[in-house]
Amino acid sequence: MPKVARKEKILEKASGLFRNKGYHGTTIRDISEASGILSGSLYAHIRSKEDLLFEITDRGAEHFLQSVRPIIEGEGDAITKLRKAMVAHVQVITDHLEAATVFFHEWKSLTDERRHMIQTKRDEYEGLWAQLLVEGMNEGCFRKVDEKFARLLILSAMNGLYQWYQPDGEQTPIEVAERYASILLAGLAHREGSAL
Amino acid sequence: MPKVARKEKILEKASGLFRNKGYHGTTIRDISEASGILSGSLYAHIRSKEDLLFEITDRGAEHFLQSVRPIIEGEGDAITKLRKAMVAHVQVITDHLEAATVFFHEWKSLTDERRHMIQTKRDEYEGLWAQLLVEGMNEGCFRKVDEKFARLLILSAMNGLYQWYQPDGEQTPIEVAERYASILLAGLAHREGSAL
DNA sequence: GCTAAAAACAAGCAAGCGCTTGTTTTTTTG
DNA sequence: CAAAAAAACAAGCGCTTGCTTGTTTTTAGC
């Protein structure tokens, strides 16, 4: 098998295994078997097991950043941008379910420098959402709530997706994201309810 | 050290290690060292490493069930019960941060039967929330949205807590839960916004 | 305070781990 | 189609893993 194709196959299989069994729960032999080669042959393509984890995690981070940044930094009112950003975020999760899970769950198994590199991208990503929320509150289209609370609530709610989303389910990622956005923006309670 | 105290210390240290390094990333020697004994001595108190994981996870499940069940099955309107249930859920997380994390993250590393036992309790717990949401929609105090979406959104949002909550922070668990409830019930957008 | 039980130690086993080395097979390239 | 390069194999090394065994120390009940 040509070099690039094999490397991609290894990354894909490793993503699935890391997602299902965790980084420490997955062995080099698991990965090589799933990739259709012997364990020693893996090392013609990777330098270490942790290299795999880093590459998967870093690609995950880049997917999120590149999908959402242009929306948040672009033009439009905050509510529209929030909806678009949520759809984009959800689509990254549903399009790259394994990599997204590894990005959320397993990045802490990276050692010092690489862990720090991912942390930096995570911070950058959270910063984008913070910017959007502050903008929306200043514009007056969002209620004035604690920005950090709202941000973590939104991101947590969406990230829960990777635990239950099934690619062959009935809803498209866009439908999922828009339902989430609807509940988060308009709230669960009826207007006449005693909410807040 | 007397038997019960040692066992509790082992469970406590194991919870912390499983939380920080994961089940597969934690060794028996890590746990024994943290507990102040040699690795062989552990086996006077436990039968296997997986026993530890199961006991921690099962206790976590019971905490959630026993805190939230009486609220949801008790009297009151759905909005009040939702607020109370959210406070209870958040308090379980903040009071048992390690065990809750293990319950959320590491239960999948259990083998067949025990994994299934935990799955059953998870289903039971989700069922309680489903019941509350359906009740609220029938009463008319919640908007009629897809119950499953709303339930998973609420639980995901709250469960994100264990990733950023710091016990020595400024907010009490009750304040955290009530802010979450406020946003989820009333929504992020202003009434005059183009929400929905 | 003696003694039986409980708890901890000291040593190590078998299996599995990540990874390396030396060789063979396959692919690419002129 | 031959030579060089890439990919895969076969074997195994050094180390760590979860756990066991035989012994010593500590604790608790009379």
Image (tube, coloured by chain):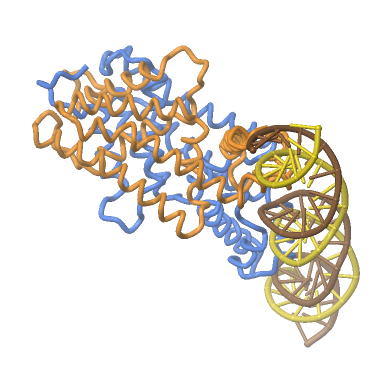
Chain colours: A orange, B blue, C brown, D yellow
Q: Please state the horizontal and vertical placement of residue C21, each as a whole percent of the image.
A: 77, 59
Q: Residue at x 25, y 30 (%)?
A: A71
Q: Residue at x 52, y 27 (%)?
A: B124
Q: Quadrant of residue B137?
A: top left
Res. A4 in view: yes
In the image: residue A108, left or right of residue B45: left
In the image: residue A129, left or right of residue B132: left
Res. B112 in view: no
Q: Please state the horizontal and vertical placement of residue B141, each as a whole percent of the image.
A: 26, 18
Q: Residue at x 36, y 22 (%)?
A: B150
Quadrant, the N terminus of chain A: top right
Q: Please state the horizontal and vertical placement of residue A62, each as a whole percent of the image.
A: 39, 39
State whether residue B43 is above or below residue C9.
above
In the image: residue B70, left or right of residue B33: left
Camera-nearest residue between A122 and A162: A122
In the image: residue A40, left or right of residue A88: right
Total labels: the figure holds 0
Quadrant, the C terminus of chain A: top left
Camera-nearest residue between A196 and A181: A181
State whether residue B29 is above or below residue A135.
below
Q: Please state the horizontal and vertical placement of residue B116, each as a whole percent of the image.
A: 64, 31
Q: Quadrant of residue A151?
A: top left
